[in-house]
Image (cartoon, rainbow, N blue to C red):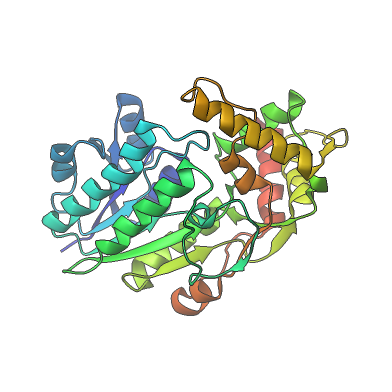
Amino acid sequence: MTDTILVTGASGYLGRNIVRDFVARGIAVRGLARSDSSAKAVEELGATPVRGDVMDVPSLRAAMEGVTSLIHAAADTNHGRTTKAQEQTNLQGTRNVYETAHAAGVKRAVHISTEAVLMDGRPIVNADETWPLPAKPAGGYSRTKGGAERIALAANGNGMDVVVVRPRFVWGRDDTSALPQLVEAAKAGRLAWFGGGTYLTSTTHIANVVEGVRLALEKGRGGEVYFLTDGDDVPFREWMTELLATQSVDTSSVKSVPRGVISFIVNTGELLAGLSGGAISGPLSKQEYATVGNTVTLNIDKARRELGYVPVMTRAEGLAELKALAAKA
């Protein structure tokens, strides 16, 4: 029987790059699409679009008919205050996906998680997969993605292997979300270095995420989690400066803000958001600060050892590619 892979979130940044890679390898791919525009994007990638939503179980049943493998990339990545939509998509939506996959006889699944499941506002240094999820997550994104990961791992077994991957700070070509937002913030004077920005961060080029997902689908052990990164760490300020330079954005005038000031701003914003039911919010959420304001470095020895994972794109190569693409635009 020919393998057929279903990708949820197929028109998103992660999803479309995963779809593009598998199609190029001659694999039959279906992409779950919530709208006509998403369906068109999936079709243009060479995959078969199937209309549906993770909250619509009948549509999931139809999408998974005859599917042998699943890549669950759909998620609400909002880093602000938790919303009902985020809880529904990341928690109930994930539950719907794996329950339907079991019923459809899907054999292998890769769940796209995130290092954010470990975030509680403190630095994360050389974390491996044995680190526990925190009792008090930094925000709604960490909490709901942590919950989604638990749901995915609980679905492992009874004929279906579920493997979880956690990339950190996904970047690179075809980024229509994070990089444009960073460029806009820098040009508007809203970018600042937190405490000098000298803390280290891991990163994961989109090509390396796709490679890790492919290997996880082929070789990953069911019920296991694997971190994915570019294989080395970099000071956050240096990284942002290099990344924005590919878009001809100069960061030499960006100011550094003391951590005490940042903490006051974050805590005040969280308080106002809580008191106002989200009607008022500060300029920086606790989730955002935990994501970009602290050391976050990850150990990928397990992925190297068990998956044979080797990054296919170095940071220097990825930056050069972005610069070349920007020059052509």
Q: Nearer the viewer, residue 252 or 296?
A: 296
Q: Nearer the viewer, residue 258 or 207?
A: 258
Residue depicted at 13% across the width and 55% down the height: 104
Residue 66: % across, % down: 14, 53
Residue 254: % across, % down: 83, 34
| Location of residue 243 by image quarter | top right
List the single residue furthest toward the top.
Answer: 279
* 313 in relation to 85, above or below: below
Residue depicted at 36% across the width and 52% down the height: 147
Left or right of 17? Residue 176 is right
Residue 96: % across, % down: 22, 46
Is residue 22 visible in the rendered structure shown here? Answer: no
Left or right of 179? Residue 248 is right
Q: Nearer the viewer, residue 140 or 178?
A: 140
Left or right of 84? Residue 175 is right
* 77 in relation to 137, above or below: above
List the single residue furthest toward the bottom.
Answer: 305
Q: How many marks?
A: 0
| Location of residue 280 by image quarter | top right
List the single residue furthest toward the right.
Answer: 252
Residue depicted at 35% across the width and 37% down the height: 42
Residue depicted at 52% across the width and 34% down the height: 80
Left or right of 19? Residue 187 is right
Residue 22: % across, % down: 37, 54
Is residue 79 visible in the rendered structure shown here? Answer: yes
In the picture, which quadrant includes the N terminus? bottom left
In the picture, which quadrant includes the C terminus? top right
